[in-house]
């Protein structure tokens, strides 16, 4: 029984993390038809922002030593600035190109960001310890204890999801963003400013990436210049499974991928466990064979003019 | 002259879709552009709205040059387009769709007044205020997009084939509404139509566009026998309509 509860919490927490990642990608895809493979590197930048820029072997905390509130604000702000810069310096100039072109540009941006980090911080992994109190265990009933951080990830995710839903439904710009996501050209013809809607999507995407950077680094305690790449792959898969262009789909896809990975890790016998990711991808292929449009259907799957 | 399209040429990749086309609209007029499929009618409207960029020629609105401006800037200048195929935001509800039309406006109290007025003109939209726009019938969606365009408080509204996909009695209804809007609010209208009969019935002036070139323009009063319009529409020497599929 303990094991089951622990597995469930762990699955939900993984799922939440992937859902946030998929949402960051889905937001940009919905208004711009951009699959942003640099999203994982935004998270990496959020992590490296915690320490003093230097290639020294032992990392010195900079923002990582701030008061927790200030720490969160600084990291999130830095990632938002990086996301906005990547729009104005890079994506804005290719936004009328095909989705394939934009995707390749995002790969290029991702590599560039990774190499900038490599140049400044060096290639060696660096240990960083933030929010150490969160990595402890908490007892939720007799003999069942789970990591506090897992509960925090789930809670943070749901707070962000609810805030995002309220923003998209209740605010004027939120409604404009939904309209632009469905029919970008029509929204512009009604006077919705296309550039600010896209910039807003980058801000939201950066906000999510910044928070994820904090959660991720708290969990792993290590910074490497390529740490965004493997998780980005899972976010992308989650977005595809959920159905490109649907934010609900991104969340559903994120949870699906997270839960499947954790459950496989729990039930697979030890020898096969190392092939877990391969099995996750196999399941993805099977899902997509049955539902190539993804789990959640969208009206706006068509291309924009 | 409120809107003037002066000798514009528009290319899709390298093929010309419009060749030196000119259209003008005076304040308070209803002007129709008619022509067969692929004549370049929608291209003309999309160029006015800043979605397409003419390779040569000028578009001026209220004395200001507007070609090269973004679609949102054109909308802000006072031109509102109802494009072909209606384009309601299906996942937004009726009220949200209408509110998008007010994005460009700051005059808050007037917005609320106009909002109420639009619901009075189209009572069906008031009834379905909270329903997803995708669930409306074709006719209701047409009302919604016209109402939405009205809420941008335009000086001229351009409409691409308001009759497309609607039953004949609904088409009558749409045109009645448009004529009333002209009468009550002095709205200027530039309408693209496939049916020349409809245009002869409702417009003040008429243009016939075929193969990306202007064939005829004139006052509807002078064209009532319809013969000239028909000839311009189908081409002169030809008895068949071979020439219709063009330009794209």
Image (spheres, rainbow, N blue to C red):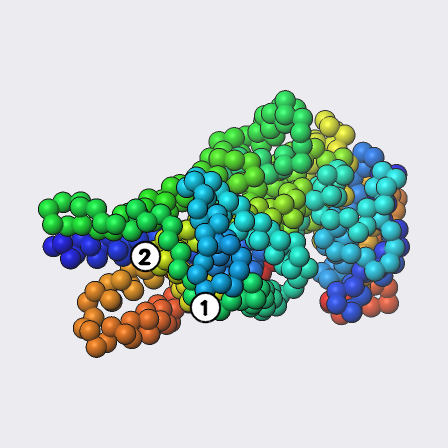
Figure check: A159 above or below B12:
above
Q: Position of residue A61 (x, y in %)?
A: 45, 52
Q: Is residue B76 left or right of residue A73?
A: right
Instruction: State left or right for residue B221 relative to residue A290.
Output: right
Image quadrant for the C terminus of chain B? Answer: bottom right
Residue B92: x and y in percent read 50, 42
In the displayed structure, A168 sits above or below A111; it is above
User: Dot 2: few (<14), some (14–19), or many (≥20) neighbours within 10 Å?
Assistant: many
Residue at 44%, 46% (x, y): give it: A65
Callout 2: chain:
A
Residue shown at 58%/35% (left/top)?
Answer: B99
Q: Seen in the image, is B22 located left or right of residue A33?
A: right
Mark 2 and mark 1 residues within 8 Å of each other at the beta carbon: no
On screen, residue A253 versus residue A123, left or right, reads left
| In front: label 2 or label 1 | 1
Q: Quadrant of the N terminus of chain B?
A: top right
Picture quadrant where residue A104 is located: bottom right
Mark 2: secondary structure: helix
In the drawing, what numbered circle is on residue A124?
A: 1
Looking at the image, residue A267 lies above or below residue B70: below
Q: Residue at x 51, y 44 (%)?
A: A74
Residue A218 pos. (x, y %): 36, 53
Q: Is label 1 in a helix, a strand or a loop?
A: loop
* Cα–Cα span, label 2 and label 1: 26 Å
Task: State which tag comes first along the sequence, 2 or 1.
Answer: 2
Q: Position of residue A9 (x, y in %)?
A: 24, 52
Q: Which residue is mark 2?
A: A14
Residue A234: in sight, yes or no?
Answer: yes
């Amino acid at each position: 029984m303990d094991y089951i509860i622990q597995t469930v919490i762990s699955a939900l927490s993984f799922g939440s993390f992937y859902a946030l990642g998929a949402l960051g990608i889905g937001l940009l895809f919905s208004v711009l038809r951009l699959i942003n493979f640099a999203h994982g590197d935004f998270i990496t930048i959020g992590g490296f922002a915690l320490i003093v820029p230097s290639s020294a072997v032992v990392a010195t905390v900079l923002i990582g030593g701030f008061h927790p509130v200030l720490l969160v604000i600084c990291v999130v702000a830095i990632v938002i600035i990086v996301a906005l810069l990547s729009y104005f310096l890079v994506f804005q100039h290719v936004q009328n190109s095909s989705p394939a072109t934009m995707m390749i540009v995002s790969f290029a941006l991702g590599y560039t960001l990774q190499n900038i980090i490599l140049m400044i911080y060096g290639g060696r992994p660096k240990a960083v310890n933030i929010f150490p109190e969160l990595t402890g265990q908490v007892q939720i009933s007799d003999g069942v204890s789970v990591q506090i951080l897992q509960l925090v990830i789930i809670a943070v995710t749901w707070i962000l999801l609810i805030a995002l839903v309220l923003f998209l439904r209740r605010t004027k710009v939120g409604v404009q963003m939904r309209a632009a996501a469905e029919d970008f050209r029509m929204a512009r013809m009604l006077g919705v400013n296309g550039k600010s809607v896209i910039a807003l999507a980058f801000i939201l995407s950066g906000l999510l990436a910044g928070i994820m950077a904090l959660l991720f680094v708290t969990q792993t305690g290590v910074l490497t210049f390529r740490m965004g790449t493997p998780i980005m792959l899972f976010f992308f898969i989650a977005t595809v499974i959920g159905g490109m262009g649907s934010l609900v789909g991104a969340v559903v896809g994120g949870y699906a991928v997270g839960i499947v990975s954790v459950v496989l890790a729990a039930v697979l016998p030890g020898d096969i466990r190392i092939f877990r990711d391969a099995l996750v991808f196999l399941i993805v292929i099977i899902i997509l064979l049955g539902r190539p449009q993804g789990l959640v259907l969208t009206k706006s799957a068509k291309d924009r003019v | 002259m409120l809107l003037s399209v002066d000798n514009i040429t528009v290319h899709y990749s390298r093929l010309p879709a419009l060749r030196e086309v000119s259209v003008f609209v005076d304040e308070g007029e209803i002007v129709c552009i008619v022509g067969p499929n692929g004549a370049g009618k929608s291209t003309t409207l999309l160029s006015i709205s800043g979605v397409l960029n003419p390779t040569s020629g000028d578009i001026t609105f209220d004395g200001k040059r507007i070609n090269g401006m973004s679609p949102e800037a054109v909308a802000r200048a006072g031109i509102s387009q109802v494009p072909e195929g209606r384009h309601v935001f299906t996942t937004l509800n009726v009220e949200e769709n209408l509110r998008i039309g007010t994005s460009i406006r700051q005059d808050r109290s007037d917005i609320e007044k106009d909002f109420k007025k639009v619901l009075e003109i189209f009572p069906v939209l008031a009834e379905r205020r909270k329903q997803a726009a995708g669930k409306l019938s074709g006719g209701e969606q047409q009302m919604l997009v016209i109402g939405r365009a009205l809420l941008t408080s335009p000086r001229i509204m351009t409409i691409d084939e308001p009759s497309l996909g609607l039953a004949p009695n609904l088409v009558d209804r749409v045109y009645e509404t448009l004529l009333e809007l002209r009468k009550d609010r002095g709205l200027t209208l530039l309408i693209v139509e496939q049916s020349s009969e409809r245009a002869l019935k409702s417009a003040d002036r008429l243009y016939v566009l075929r193969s990306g070139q202007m064939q005829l323009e004139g006052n509807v009063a002078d064209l009532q026998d319809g013969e000239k319009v028909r000839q311009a529409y189908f081409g002169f020497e030809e008895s068949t309509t071979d020439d219709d599929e063009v330009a794209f």
